[in-house]
Image: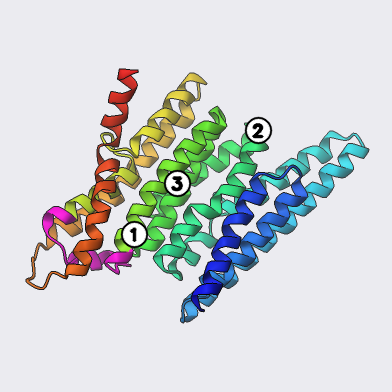
Amino acid sequence: MNKSSNLLFSIMMMLSVIFSISSNSWFTVWMGMEINMMAFLPLIMNQKNMTSKESALTYFLVQTIASMLMLMSIIIMMTNKMIINNTYNLIGELLLMSSLMIKSGISPFHMWMPKMMEGMDWNKCLILMTWQKITPMMMLSLVFKMNFIITSAMMLSIIVGSIGGLNQTSLRKLMAYSSINNNGWMLAAMMTSENMWMLYFSMYSLMMTLMTMSMMMHKIHHMNQLMSMNESTYKKFMLLINILSISGLPPMMGFLPKWMVIQSSLNLNELMIMGMMVMLTLITIYYYMRMMYTMMMLTNSEPKWNLKSLNKSNNLMMPLTIITTIGLSMSTMIISLF
């Protein structure tokens, strides 16, 4: 695909999200989501291999099913306004929430995500994990009602996200499970306020961007490739501290949004859910640590042919990585000042 059509689809993809989240009716939200899907599909198929075609087909089917469910739920809720019946309303809300959960890959509707991410390159994975989640998450926060469905989806996302990533060697699949885990945390953030999940989402997006960019730069897709990374120990360490930040280890920036969610949920007396979430997130820290360990400890060769181009692009990444590293201490200082 040439650059101009690539640019066209990217602009369409961005505008459709803005169109969806600023619309005032469910029908226009649905339209925006459809435009978004149709713009993202050619971007996935841009690669010249079979796996990307498979990913595109998976994405198309999943999103279409979710869209049909969404339309159905809108119709049910509209007829409910004419016939006052509470059962209809409940079914409509349930269908609407389910369709939005399918679109954003929240468990138990998560099965398509790891499979699909395996077939795409890193920048498409980044778009899927961040930009493509804005509309469904935004809409979910509007219809959000704390009930059994939401609570179970939250818990399931965190369980699947932590345990699913344990037996993965592919980094893209690992990131997919990490994304499912973070979906659960975002649902927990929605319990408090809209601002809370948006803050969580923006920090998550920043960390994911750093992670995917560094992996794309070094062309790493699997765990064993981490060992032969053509960088000095110091640079490896700097790039990998960002991975610890994604996992939510305390002094890093990634812990700050989790900390805020924990604090606000404890204020709402959600002790059981929070206890479970914190314990299960420890498992995700384990698999991120395993990733770091293979990279830092097992091999440490410094070849003479360090490529200049890599180093140049790396230098741009370093300041951002430092921000995510000392993010929590910086933000704590700022909070204490004010």
Numbered label attached to residue 145: 2
Query: Does residue 14 appear to the left or right of 26 in the view shown?
Result: left
Q: Residue furthest front?
A: 4
Amino acid type of the residue that numbered disc 2 sits on in the rendered structure? Lys
Residue 183 percent across, percent down from the top left: 50, 45
Compared to 255, does 207 lie above or below? Answer: below
Are the residues flagged by discs 2 and 3 in contact, CB closer than 8 Å? no
Please tell me which residue is depicted at 47% across the width and 24% down the height of the picture. Answer: 264
Q: Earlier in the sequence, mark 1 or mark 3?
A: 3
Q: Is residue 223 magenta?
A: yes
Q: Quadrant of the C terminus?
A: top left
Q: Is residue 103 magenta?
A: no
Towards the viewer: 274 or 318: 318
Amino acid type of the residue that numbered disc 1 sits on in the rendered structure? Met
For the question of whether residue 263 can be seen, the reply is yes
Residue labelled with disc 3: 181
Please tell me which residue is depicted at 25% across the width and 37% down the height of the picture. Answer: 326
Distance from disc 1 to disc 3, alpha carbons, whole Å, reads 21 Å
Residue 128 percent across, percent down from the top left: 50, 58
Tell me the quarter of the picture where residue 333 sits.
Answer: top left
Residue labelled with disc 1: 213
Towards the viewer: 247 or 206: 206
SS at mark 1 in the image: helix
Q: Is the residue marked by circle 1 packed among few (<14), some (14-19), or many (20+) residues within 10 Å? A: some
Find the magenta span and give its range. Answer: 216-235
Query: Does residue 139 appear to the left or right of 228 in the view shown?
Result: right
